Amino acid sequence: MLSAADYLAFASLLPVPPSGLDQQFSGLNHDRLRAIAARNNIYSHLLALMRQTTMSQWDPLFVDHLQDRVRLAQRFGLLHAYHLRRVLAAFAEHGLAVMPIKGPLLSEKLYGDPTFRPSADLDIL
């Protein structure tokens, strides 16, 4: 059986969160959920899921940590998007056809936000 932390981490990745999320908080281990979020880099997903629940059920220190991590991911995401535009412009200036894959482009297409899905590099084909 999944722990409450495992369930919430998994639910945050679903396109449509399951009903009854507020009932999943009994026995929630915020430290475990923090570790899962760090290992899988799903801070933005969890924050979006949290906003669909009763926020008072979340540990305020965990919420602060999550919001800090999301802000940091957004800054890196914007930096990646900026550099991707510069790299694509440089290739276009020299008449080279390239196609970005994953990274800010995928995040923009899937979530409407180039910073929502963190990436560590820019992949260009």
Image: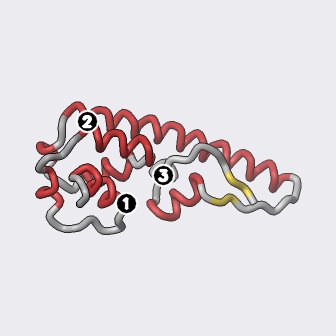
Q: Which structural element holds mark 2?
A: helix
Amino acid type, label 1 = Leu
Residue at image mark 1 = 13
Q: Nearer the viewer, residue 116 or 22?
A: 22
| Residues at marks 2 and 1, CA–CA distance in whole angstroms | 19 Å
Q: Is residue 41 left or right of residue 23?
A: right
Tell which circle, 2 or 3, labels the residue nearer the N-terminal end.
2
The spot of residue 19 in percent (x, y) is 18, 67
Residue at image mark 2 = 62
**Which residue is at a point 21% across and 42% down the rendered structure image?**
29
Amino acid type, label 3 = Arg
| Residues at marks 2 and 3, CA–CA distance in whole angstroms | 20 Å
The spot of residue 63 in percent (x, y) is 25, 37
Q: Which structural element holds mark 1?
A: loop
**Which residue is at a point 37% across and 60% down the rendered structure image?**
13
**Residue 14 versus residue 35 in the image, above or below:** below
